[in-house]
Image: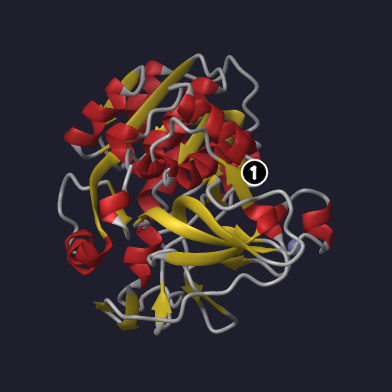
Amino acid sequence: MVLSEYRRLEMADVAEPVPGSGEVLVRVAACGICGSDVHGYDGSSGRRIPPLIMGHEAAGTVAAVGEGVTAWAPGDRVTFDSTVSCGQCPFCLRGDINLCDRREVLGVSCGEYRRAGAFAEYVTVPERILYRLPASMPFAEAAMLEAVSVALHAVKMGGVHGGETALVIGAGMIGLLTLQAARVAGCSRVLIADVDATRLRLARSLGADEVLQVSGDDLSRQVLERLPSGADVVLEAVGRDATVSAAIASVVKGGTVVLIGNIAPRVTVPLQVVVSRQLRLQGTAASSGEYPEAIDLVSSGKIQVKPLISAVAPLDEGPRWFERLYAGEPGLMKVALVPHPEAAS
Ligand SMILES: [Zn+2]
Ligand SMILES: [Zn+2]
C-alpha cells in the first residue's frame, strides 16, 4: 500500500525486498495504523514524503534470512522495533537505542532518509531489532507491542519505583497503555483524565482507580481535590498547551511530568512554577529495550491490548481505514491491517 501522494494511498506491485547481510525478510501478518501515520498522511508532519510504504507497528514470520544471520530461520514468529538503530554509535553502545545518531524509523521518509515500512506483504529489517513471539500471541495483538513498549518506556522515564500516585492525561491508545504500564510498575493509585466518556469507560475497565472527564483548569482542580499535594508523577499523553499546563499544575513539588504527547510543536511553560516547585519535565521517545518486557506483560494478560483494537482488516481496505481515521471517526482506536487475510491468525 503506497502513499503515492499526500492523502492518496494505492495498492501497487513493488519488487519483493531482498534481505542484505545481517537482515531478515519478514512476511508481514499484521501492521497497525499509528497516529503518526495518520498525521503524516496529509503532509502536515513532513515525515511521510511520498512515494512511501508506511507502517511500523508490525508482526509476522521470517520468510528468508540474509548473509550471516544464524539466530533466525524461516517460520519464526517475530515482531520488530519501529526504530532501526545502528548498534554502533555512542548512544546505541550505552543502550539508548532510541537516541541512535543514525536512527531511522520504518515507514518514514523525512528528507534525510526513506525507509519502506510494513503496510506490505514483505519488509526487510536488521536482525538486531527482531524479537521472538510466543506461539500463543495473535499477530494483531503482537502489532500492539510497539505501542506497549512506548508506554513502558514512558513510565520508566517517570522514575516510578512503586507506591507512587500517578495521573495520566489523555485516554487514547498510548494513554490507556500508559495507565496499564503505571499499574504494572506498582503505582498505588492511577487517575486518568480525558474529555471522552467512552474512552474513560475503557480506562476504568483497564484498571484506572479514578477517571476524570474534564479538561483545562478544572483538570488540576479535580486532581488536587483527590491528591491535595498533587500526583507524584504525571504522564502527559496529549501534547497541547492546555494539557501540558494541567500536567504541571497537577504534579507534586519535586515531582516529574513525563511528556509523551507532542501534537503541538510548541507549548508555553509556566517557568516560575517549574523552577520554584523544582519540577522535572522529562521527555520520552519511542522505547529502548522494553520489547521483551512488553511481550511478557501482554502474553500474561497483565497488559491488555485486545480492547484497544477496533478492527482487523485486509490491507487492501487500508486506504478506506486511513480516511476514516483521518476524519477522526469517534470510537476508533487501533486498526490493524492484514496483508494475507487468508492466512491470518
Ligand atoms: Zn507509531
Ligand atoms: Zn546508533
Residue under the image location 28 percent in, 41 percent down: 309
Residue under the image location 23 percent in, 39 percent down: 195
Q: Quadrant of residue 204?
A: top left
Q: Amino acid at mark 1?
A: Val
Quadrant in which the C terminus appears: top left
How many labels were placed on the picture?
1
Tell whether 10 sits left or right of 257: left
Residue under the image location 39 percent in, 67 percent down: 120
Residue under the image location 54 percent in, 34 percent down: 294
Colour theme: secondary structure
Q: Quadrant of ligand 2?
A: bottom right
Can residue 135 be seen here? The reply is yes
Quadrant in which the N terminus appears: bottom left
Q: Nearer the viewer, residue 231 or 2?
A: 2
Q: Quadrant of residue 7?
A: bottom left
Q: Position of residue 83 (x, y in %)?
A: 59, 59
Can residue 279 be seen here? The reply is no
Q: In the rendered image, which residue does mark 1 sit on?
A: 275
Tell whether 118 sits left or right of 205: right
Q: Nearer the viewer, residue 196 or 249?
A: 196
**Above-or-below relation of 27 to 4:** above
